[in-house]
Structures are given as C-alpha cells and as structure tokens.
Image: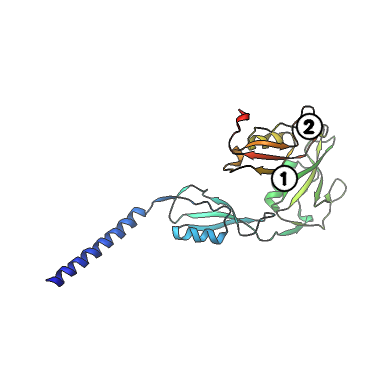
C-alpha cells in the first residue's frame, strides 16, 4: 500500500512538471520581446547575447570607418527597441578591419560635375567621404568641381588628372568647387538650434559641420541643442565658403533658449 502511494505521488509530481514545462512553452511561443541594442558591440558578443534568445545575427554589409576597430556593429535592422519574435533575423553592418584600396584612375569623371551628385556617387562606389576644401569664382555653373585633392595631393583639375595615386576606401577627398559670388558668407548663428536644423542651415550656406562635442548624455543627437559654436556669430563678420564649424550640444533645451 505504501509503495502504491509513493508511486502515485511520483506520477503526480512528473505530471505537474510536464504541465509547467508545456505551459511555459506555449506561453512563450510567438511572444514578442524588445530587441537589444547591438550597435557598438562586437559581432562575437552580439551573437553570444542573441543566440540564447533565438535571434540570428546576419551580416548584410561592412565598411571601413577610419579610427574604428574592425568587427564592430554600426547599424542594425530592426532597430533597438523593436518588438520581435524568437527566430527573427537581425541584419547588421560591421566595420572592416582594414581599408581596401584602389588606383585613382578608377574614379569617375569629376571635373566640371555637380559636387552634390558626385559626393553621393563616390560614397556608393568607394565608401569615400567628400569635403569642400575651398570655393573659387568661376563663370560656369555654381557648385561644380574645379579641383580634387587626396591627402593634400592634387588628383585632378581642368588641366590634368593623376592615375597613379593609391586611394583607401573610407578615406576623404577634398574638393574645390565653383561659385559665381564672392567666396564668403555671413557667419550663421547656430546657438539654440537643434543639430538637424544647424546641418540644414550650414548646408544651405555652403558651410561644413566639423567636430561635435557632447555635454552630458545624448540620446538623440539630431534633436540635441547647440550651446556653443566656433567660430562665433558676430554681426558683420563673414567666413569663407566651405569653412567648418565646431559645436557643442546638449540633449535638453537650455532655459536661455526659451
């Protein structure tokens, strides 16, 4: 009799364990979870975190970023915080360990072409960044390319084009572009502007955004506010087209900006 009671008790315990297991399996099946942020994390560490949660990390692209080590995730789809199910594929872009290189004769035709169009083309083809080095008066159309430099070496102008210079992908080309007006504009006042608004203002004025210093925690740079700019805006003061600005941002709008 005692053995029968013990066996019955063990059977009940096993049934209870099985019921709890399958109930938990049913409850979690199809459940959506908030996706972790993998940007800034190495691929190996991202996989260690993702695989136990049923996610699959898929490398969709990679590019060389100057100053960043290789194997670091710089973008992910879906974005962090998205509600996703187990088994979801997470597509990421990584930094490359070494920059690929190519000869300058592979560059597309640049002289006399519109700067904005060629800037996009160069990044898409070679992951090259573009920066305005100077602006010169030219009777032709505005914002067209007159000269191109790489690491202070002349690549091309209206008279010559170098084909023997090795260029690293992810690096920067410097441009001299045309203007029909003078080469200077008033210094814009960026104070209390959001970073997104300042970018638009600088672009409209043919100016460049240089280094960005962050004060405090920045959760969304595009909506952060500018509290300092170099050079400062002064009435009557001008600056050369293509010049670069250094700014400091904070996330919350300062009281003096109201």
Q: Which residue is mark 2?
A: 185
The image shows residue 109, relative to residue 50, as above or below, that is: above
Locate the C terminus by quadrant. Answer: top right
Residue extending furthest left? 1
Element type at mark 2: strand
Of the pair 56 and 123, the residue shown nearer to us: 56
Of the pair 146 and 76, the residue shown nearer to us: 76
Q: Along the horizontal axis of the image, is 55 left or right of 69? A: left
- Give coordinates of residue 128: x percent, y percent: 71, 51
Crowd band around label 1 with a 10 angstrom C-alpha radius: few (<14), some (14–19), many (20+): some
- Give coordinates of residue 179: x percent, y percent: 81, 35
Earlier in the chain: of badge 2 and badge 1, it is: 1
Q: Nearer the viewer, mark 2 or mark 1?
A: 2
Q: Residue at x 74, y 50 (%)?
A: 172
- Give coordinates of residue 49: x percent, y percent: 49, 58
In this rendering, the count of numbered labels is 2
Q: Along the horizontal axis of the image, is 81 left or right of 116? A: left
Element type at mark 1: helix
Q: CA distance from mark 2 to mark 1?
A: 22 Å
Q: Residue at x 79, y 45 (%)?
A: 175
Q: Which residue is mark 1?
A: 119
Q: Along the horizontal axis of the image, is 172 left or right of 18? A: right
Residue 91: numbered disc: none
Quarter of image, res 203: top right
Quarter of image, res 184: top right
Q: Residue at x 75, y 58 (%)?
A: 102
The image shows residue 82, relative to residue 190, as above or below, that is: below
């Amino acid at each position: 009799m005692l053995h029968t009671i013990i066996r019955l008790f063990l059977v009940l315990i096993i049934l209870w364990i099985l019921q709890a297991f399958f109930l938990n399996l049913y409850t979690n099946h199809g459940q959506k979870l908030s996706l972790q942020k993998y940007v800034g994390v190495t691929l190996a560490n991202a996989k260690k975190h993702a695989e136990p949660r049923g996610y699959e990390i898929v490398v969709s692209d990679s590019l060389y970023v100057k100053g960043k080590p290789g194997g670091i995730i710089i973008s992910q789809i879906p974005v962090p915080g998205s509600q996703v199910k187990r088994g979801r594929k997470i597509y990421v872009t990584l930094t490359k360990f070494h920059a690929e290189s190519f000869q300058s004769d592979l560059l597309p035709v640049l002289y006399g072409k519109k700067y904005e169009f060629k800037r996009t083309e160069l990044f898409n083809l070679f992951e090259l960044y573009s920066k305005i080095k100077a602006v010169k008066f030219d009777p032709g159309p505005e914002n067209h390319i007159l000269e191109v430099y790489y690491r202070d070496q002349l690549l091309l102008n209206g008279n010559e084009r170098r084909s023997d210079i090795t260029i690293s992908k992810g690096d920067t080309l410097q441009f001299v572009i045309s203007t029909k007006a003078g080469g200077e504009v008033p210094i814009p006042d960026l104070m209390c502007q959001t970073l997104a608004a300042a970018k638009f203002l600088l672009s409209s004025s043919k100016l460049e955004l240089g280094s960005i210093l962050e004060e405090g925690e920045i959760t969304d740079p595009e909506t952060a506010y500018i509290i300092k700019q170099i050079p400062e805006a002064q009435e009557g003061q001008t600056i050369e087209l293509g010049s670069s600005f250094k700014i400091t941002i904070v996330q919350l709008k300062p009281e003096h900006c109201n």
